[in-house]
Image (cartoon, rainbow, N blue to C red):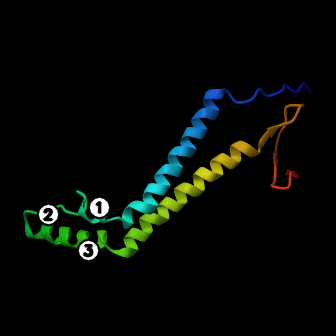
Amino acid sequence: MVSHAETPAPWHHVLARLLFAIFLFELGVFLIVYPWLDAWSINRFATFGGDTLTTATFADIWRRMWISPYFRGAISGLGVVNIYISLLEVVSMRRRKTEPDGEERFEDHAGDPVE
């Protein structure tokens, strides 16, 4: 059986993965911090109103939910997930190594091969 040595990923693929990880990290930081700022309660999503009784009732419920610390915490939790995914992306870029015979292998933190 002939084994072909894999070529490393093109630079633009590596750059795209890195930019994606940076974007996810920045989005995560934004989602963690912004819900706890004063601007959160005065943006367009929090201040819409309604012309009819039904939409006005919905707007009141939405407003109470929007400023709730539980909802803000849920949004911040999504930010933590974004940061976690960005770190996983960077770690997976770093851990990927190619053997001389073309086989890919992954190493754990101690440098031992992972099956």
The type of residue carrying mark 1 is Ala
Residue 26 vertical position relative to residue 78 in the rendered view, above or below: above
Percent coordinates x, y for residue 103 in the rendering: 85, 36
Q: Secondary structure at mark 2?
A: loop
On the image, numbered disc 2 is attached to which residue?
Answer: 49
- Mark 1 or mark 2: whose residue is earlier in sequence: 1
Contact check, label 1 and label 2, Cβ < 8 Å: no
Q: CA distance from mark 3 to mark 2?
A: 13 Å
On the image, numbered disc 3 is attached to which residue?
Answer: 64
Q: Estimate how packed mark 2 is, as few (under 14), some (14 to 19) or many (20 or more) residues with alpha carbons within 10 Å.
A: some
The type of residue carrying mark 2 is Gly
**Which residue is pictured at 30% across the width and 72% down the height?**
65
Q: Estimate how packed mark 1 is, as few (under 14), some (14 to 19) or many (20 or more) residues with alpha carbons within 10 Å.
A: few
Is 9 or 26 nearer to us in this picture?
26
Residue 39 disc label: 1
Percent coordinates x, y for residue 47 in the rendering: 19, 63
Q: Nearer the viewer, mark 1 or mark 2?
A: 1
